[in-house]
Image: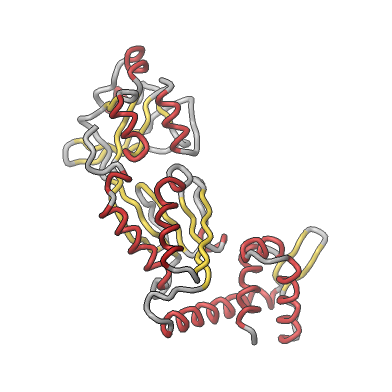
Amino acid sequence: MDIEELQTFVEIADAGGVSPAARRLGVSKSIVSRRLSRLESELGIQLLARTTRGAALTEAGATFRDYAARVCAEIDVARETILPAGDLRGRLRVAAPLSFGPTHFAPVLAEMARRHPRLHIHTSYSDRFVDLVSEGFDCAIRVGYLQDSDLVARRVGPISGKLVASPSYIAAHGAPATPDELVEHQALMQGTEAWHLLDGDRTITVRPQGSFKADNGLALVAAAVAGLGIGYLPDCLTHEHVASGVLVPVMTDHPPPPAGAYVVRPPGQYPSRKIRALTELLIESFEQTPQRWGLGIDA
């Protein structure tokens, strides 16, 4: 049984159809369809039911998908085991945040591609929460405070942040000094999230309110600069504005607790060499270029 056909079928199953699988694989729809047809012919069963509303796995297809995925995973491990050290091949699908992924993580991914020219790296930048398993990603780079989940996480570096506002906002509304005062101000938020602040050795949770919301960190920085409210933002997005005086730190007696950047992956026995290589390169970037991440900058 052809491993490429098995891999293609797993992509079809996870992506929800031939067309999205073709986009993931970077090949034409006709190639994906031919691979599926050959696999169905070899097995003598129908794996995918085509309807006027799209396509769905048959009962046999749903059962076979789990076996096919395990076989593909074992083949990947076997290939990595026998390849020369440092010689990475295949495809690595990474989900990264849009807020500063293109400016901070993209150079690291580009360096990885330079070091491993036979590796195909496909990166999706978005600030939405990505389901790694259902959307077919090998791993994700996430920043902040990780929620409890079944995913396996490896911390690659620290991310510091602070509460900031523009001088014009402070002149008009004053600067909050306590968490109780903070909830009376306009907060610049991604949604309805809670803010974590330090009160001495204790971490407290504040649920701020605000009329301006955006799912992107750079958009929240722009709103803070425009004087629309108080932002809870990472230093790597704000340190230049703070250094120039365009933004001013507030609530300095109650700073956010240290956060981090993480590589997360679906659960499994061992991370692949590709994921380990990316993790090590990200750790190297944090250690060698801390200024890129706004670390060690007193602004």
Q: Residue at x 16, y 37 (%)?
A: 200
When the figure is inspected, residue 291 is found, relative to residue 5, above or below; the finding is above
When the figure is inspected, residue 3 is found, relative to residue 52, above or below; the finding is below
Residues 83 and 129: in front is 83
Question: Which residue is at the far left?
Answer: 200
Across and down, in percent, residue 99 comes to 45, 42
Which quadrant would the N terminus be assigned to in this image?
Answer: bottom right
Question: Is residue 227 toward the left or the right of residue 164 in the image?
Answer: right
Across and down, in percent, residue 233 comes to 36, 36
- Quarter of the view holding residue 238: top left
Residues 198 and 158: in front is 158
Which quadrant would the C terminus be assigned to in this image?
Answer: top left
Q: Residue at x 34, y 29 (%)?
A: 241
State how many labels appear: 0
Q: How is the image coloured?
A: secondary structure
Across and down, in percent, residue 172 comes to 36, 12
When the figure is inspected, residue 77 is found, relative to residue 105, above or below; the finding is below
- Quarter of the view holding residue 26: bottom right
Across and down, in percent, residue 242 comes to 30, 29
- Quarter of the view holding residue 15: bottom right
When the figure is inspected, residue 285 is found, relative to residue 228, above or below; the finding is below
Q: Residue at x 40, y 26 (%)?
A: 224
Residues 210 and 38: in front is 38
Q: Residue at x 71, y 66 (%)?
A: 28
Question: Which residue is at the far top?
Answer: 172
Question: Is residue 148 toward the left or the right of residue 89 in the image?
Answer: left
Question: Is residue 288 toward the left or the right of residue 55 in the image?
Answer: left
